[in-house]
Amino acid sequence: MKKGHLILTIMLIIVMGLAAISCGPKENGKPSEPGQESSNGTESTSQSCSVGIVVKSLDNDYYTTLRNGAEKRAKEKGVDLTFVAPNSETDVQGQVDMIANLIAAKVDVLAVCPSDDEATLPVIQEAGEAGIPVIAVDNDTSYDKKLTFIGTGNFEAALEGGKYCAEQVGKGAKAIMLRGPEGSSNHDQRRDGYIEALTKGGVEILEIKDCACDASTAMSAIEDFSTFYDDIDLIICTNDTMAIGAQRAVETGNLDTLVFGFDGSLDVCKGTAEGKFLGTVAQDPYSMGVIAIDAALDIVAGKKIEERIDSGCTVVTKENAQSFIDLLEEQSK
């Protein structure tokens, strides 16, 4: 073989080898479960990176907003995205099964928002053992080999929200707190932030009730509490779904009680602008979804990412609610 031909052959082999370096084909197909799975709508190719994101539920617009951010970014970047969630935040086993499905599908990166850290830890560890990089989104995991946590500093955010509430109701006021499921670290941290802020502000916390992030449960709880306590000045919640249920109870019972949420959902922001809610702590789930896709791409590319990525938060009040409404409506397009 002539020397020129040999060089050309070697160059072709190198080019072919480089072209083969990618995330590789994945067998991502699995039975769809109605109401549980969404896709970014792009056609998967053998060269695309596959990312699986599992959140707690798609039963509220907070996680659908996170999905919208992830889907838009995935489409822009040509990422093969599988976004799944059980029907309820309390369906922990359903979430565990979905994580297991993504491991079996051999996704390139797994992003998890665990409903229950202890219950999901074993299956998340299985992902790591299978060689799948793990990142946490919105709710952290105690898995010690996760590469990053993307989300809000829940304690700090609740502390700011609680300070605002204490200022509005004043010293000597009485409050009821409605929280999400026991075992959910973000709800534990929000509870602790609220307790510290309200206590320092001279607000008495009458009860802390686990309402499992369910509006109907929250409504029933407030209806019951209103028969036990003559004066409830504030109902402070660790998510907006429970705040919506609490506000229904306040409205139907004609109670003179302020309701404050956490998440910055469109419904509660609109209600805040109308004076139905005292406010909410707005996280940025849309940005969480975008950042999760970017982080996954960096991981696949071998880049180092930060161990903690704070997506930020703001206390939404009647004065600034409209700006958040405009933003959320834009993000939903």
Image (spheres, grey):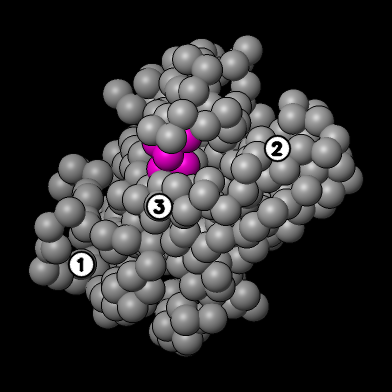
Image coordinates of residue 141 in percent, x first then y, are 58, 70
Image coordinates of residue 26 in percent, x first then y, are 24, 68
Residue that label 3 marks: 220
Query: Mark 1 belongs to which amino acid?
Result: Asn
Pick whichever, 76 or 146, lies toward us: 146
Q: How far apart are marks 2 and 1 (CA)?
A: 41 Å
**In the image: residue 316, left or right of residue 121:** right
Pick whichever of labels 3 and 2 is earlier in the sequence: 2
Q: For the N terminus, which image quadrant?
A: bottom left
Where is 95 relative to 280, above or below? below
Decide: few, some or many residues near mark 2? Use Cα within 10 Å; few <14, some 14-19, many ≥20. many
Pick whichever, 324 or 149, lies toward us: 324
**In the image: residue 18, left or right of residue 204:** left
Q: How far apart are marks 3 and 1 (CA)?
A: 42 Å
Image point (30%, 55%), residue name: 83
Pick whichever, 246 or 140, lies toward us: 246
Decide: few, some or many residues near mark 1? Use Cα within 10 Å; few <14, some 14-19, many ≥20. some
Magenta range: 245-250
Q: For the C terminus, which image quadrant?
A: top left
Q: Can residue 159 be seen in this view?
A: no
Image point (14%, 70%), residue name: 30
